[in-house]
Amino acid sequence: MITAADFDPFSVSVITDPYPWYSALHEGPRVLRDDRWDIWILSRHADVREAVRDHARYSSAEGVTYVRAPLPMMLTMDPPDHERLRRIVGREFAPRDIERFRPAVERFVDDGLEELAGSRDLVESLAVPVPIRVMAEILGVPGTDIPDLRRMADDLVKGFALAPADSAGGDASVATFDFGRITQAIVDIHGYFSTMIVERRAHPADDLVTKLIEPTGDGRLSDDELLWFCLLLLVAGIETTTNLIGNMVIALSDHPDQWQVIRKRHELIPSAVNESLRFDPPIQGFFRTTVAAVSVGDVDIPKGARVLLSFGAANRDPTHYDDSDAYRVDRNPTDHLSFGSGIHRCLGAGLAELEGRIVLEKLVERAQTLEIGGEVVRTANPTLRGAVVLPVRLG
């Protein structure tokens, strides 16, 4: 029997299937202290929600992964810098305007489903190409450059993926990251978008880079801020949606009764996307650093502590969600924490949800049955959970 004390967020067993471990967390103490990694872990929905919204005491500035890696991007900024940047770039992702991307997303999903009919691998045919083509169109990246951008984004994400020590027989207290790969990916992405910014200043186009070059009533982005924002959109906008699509298809394949529910009741598709995000989130959790001592229940977390806010565990909190380990497409859990909450709620959440809805709309039009058609290969990343290989059969 596993217990909360055995929980190691960087172990192979947890990364492979975290949900039994989250159940153990919920049966254990409200706050878990992990001496191996010198971290504190929050797993209750109310505690994670409060912490992710409390930017005055839980800072993002030292990075949101395990490694203390402060990067000058909106994801790792606190107010007032975060608020200024969010006002400038947020207008392009306002919920009321997201539907303008629908025609492009529908076109890319149709193309992906045609590819899927030949390859059967949903990740390679659909889950990766759709988000990267959507993001390329928004940023103004030509189609010929998409393979290079995909490689750069993959290199950055894989560089931050922890190589679990227990898979290599090493010291379980040492996390290994490929900082050379991370640095090179950042250099490559900055180089690409630096060239694009120069080109857009000379020859404006109808794309996001051109729009963000121009000052607004809320100010303007410096070239450095714009570069880091492009990097954030490229990586977060692709990885989150890719994992959302893959995890959603796996959940529906594992629950054929729920697949039949949305086939008969298409109006539940938005609810099914929300439930998929709750049930198996693409981002399992982010870190914060306490800037002051924080009391959670009867536990005092000291100043300067690294705190893991476990979105995946919070989304399965049985005190917040009835029958929390069940997958029910009619649940519509709009308060899930998969995109964070408060000022740091994912800027592209609405776009990711739109892409997820359109994938489901197109799938239910084409298929009566949705089944896994072979071995699923999962990501080996403690932060990002998704599929690398996902063979499916559409009947």
Image (cartoon, rainbow, N blue to C red):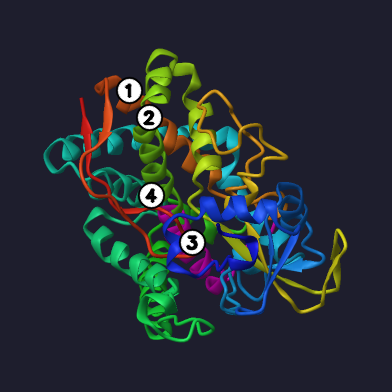
Examine the image and state in which quarter residue 293 appears. bottom right
The disc at residue 364 is: 1
Q: Which residue is mark 2?
A: 360
Residue 222, placed above or below residue 29: below
- Mark sitting earlier along the chain (4/1): 4
Which quadrant of the view contains residue 150? Answer: bottom left
Residue 343: percent from left, percent from top:
71, 53
N-terminal-most mark, 2 or 3: 3
Residue shown at the point (61%, 44%) measured from the top left: 316
CA gap between label 1 and label 3 equals: 32 Å
Disc 2 and disc 1 in contact, CB within 8 angstroms = yes
Please tell me which of labels 3 and 4 falls first in the chain.
Answer: 3
Q: Front-most of 23 and 139?
A: 23
Secondary-structure class at tag 4:
helix
CA gap, disc 4 to disc 1? 19 Å
- Rendered image: mark on residue 242: 4
